[in-house]
Image (cartoon, rainbow, N blue to C red):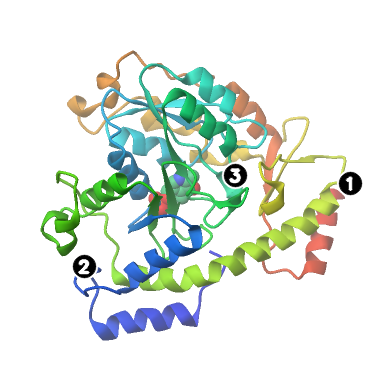
Amino acid sequence: MFEIGKEELDAIAQVITNKQFMRYRGGEGGFTETFEEEVCDKFKVKHALTVNSGTSALICSLVAMGVGPGDEVIVPAYTWIASAMAVCAVGAVPILADIDESLTIDPEDIERKITPYTKAVIPVHMINTPCDMDRIMSLAKEHGLLILEDTCQAVGISYKGKVLGSIGDMGTLSFNMYKNITCGEGGALLTNNDKFYERAIMYHDAGSFTREHAKAMDEPFFPGVNYRVSEIQGAILGEQFKRLPGIIEKLCERRKIMAEVFADCDKFKMVKNNDESSAAAIPIIYDKPLESGSLLETGRHIYTNWEPLMNQIAYHKDMNPFKWAKRKIIYTDDMCQKTLDILARAKNIEIPYDMSLNETKAYAEAICNE
Ligand SMILES: *Cc1c(COP(=O)(O)O)cnc(C)c1O
């Protein structure tokens, strides 16, 4: 969370005054719907659907794309655990791929991990840093794979002029309190595909088949869940979204100053950014493993700590995706050793959002001279 204040409070007050908390009861032009229209407009994407978390957005997107039992989905070995758990939630199995020195999924390892059962890939834009989307999209085309961009950690960041999350078949955003913008807990999915959008609406709202918009839908209705947001979240997000361009600008501005300082620093290198022109984060990498403070210490972001997954356990023995896989899936602690080696040498340097530009420069110099 970078900024929140009076505007969000006023928006919440309005929802309470209206006593209209549910997005589908207020008719058109509610807070959530208005927020989605703004997202579509600014992110240049045809459809946006707000849901109650980034994890829900991932699950809903996989459902929308028809990913299920027997399918394999390639996921990076370094990401928040939810990227991989979402795959299990729809009955498919995550196949882990290494990251490269950009800290994002290595396109070459994606290619190595493709099998006849691979249905989709989830490139994850970690720490506001974009994946190599050109390579990933061309691999997807060549092998007929669906791409779900996990943009939960990079809301509003762009890659070669396109907003992340709008490049693949679907994209997901998270609005939990650690992300670029927040409503406490929340998420959204983006897509240009009408069919995926309809299926996402159906799944995220069990009652969707009786609603006004149901009449306009072409897809057959299937049972869903409830991942809806309330208008309180929609109202906060509407205000947060207005702040987003300013937040990204401040990050980019400070990142640029720090990059100039770090360029002359011989202790470490800046992590390669797949689009230097819009870089908004500044992780660094050393030649040798760090004694402490490396990204290897970020707990559930590293596959070796994904205990429930590594053990291939499910909530019910007959609902275990690993039983439905078309081949035996074996997970070992060293299966993505390259990822572990990179993370042991890498460190994220938080952008000092509240510092002036002069202070930012001094801060970067101090890091170099540490
Ligand atoms: C935060 C995050 C999620 C999940 O978002 P929630 O809103 O916490 O469910 C998914 N993937 C990544 C990479 C994240 O950082």
* Frontmost residue, 180 versus 115: 115
The residue located at (32%, 68%) in the rendering is 33
Rendered view: 51 above or below 246: above
Up the image or down, 360 lies above or below 318; here it is: below
Q: Which residue is mark 1?
A: 264
| Between discs 1 and 2, the one toward the N terminus | 2
Q: Position of residue 101 (x, y in %)?
A: 67, 33
Q: Is residue 107 left or right of residue 280?
A: left
Q: Is residue 370 visible?
A: no
Query: Given the image, on which type of amino acid does mark 3 rest?
Result: Pro
Q: Amino acid at mark 2?
A: Tyr
What's the distance in space between the residues labelled 1 and 3, CA to CA?
24 Å
> On residue 24, which mark appears?
2
Q: Residues within 10 Å of mark 3 (few under 14, many from 20)?
A: many
Sequence order check: which comes first, mark 2 or mark 3?
A: 2
Please name the residue shown 52% across and 18% down the image.
112
Can residue 329 be seen here? yes
Mark 3 close to ligand 1, CB under 8 Å? no
- Give the mark, 1 or 3, whose residue is nearer the N terminus: 3
Q: Residue at x 45, y 36 (%)?
A: 122
The residue under the point 67% across, 65% down is 250
Indicate which label's residue lies in the foreground, 1 or 3: 3
Asked which secondary structure carries label 3, the reply is loop
Mark identifier at residue 205: none
Secondary structure type for disc 2: loop
Residue 130, numbered label: 3
Q: Which three-letter amino acid code belongs to the residue tagged 1?
A: Asp
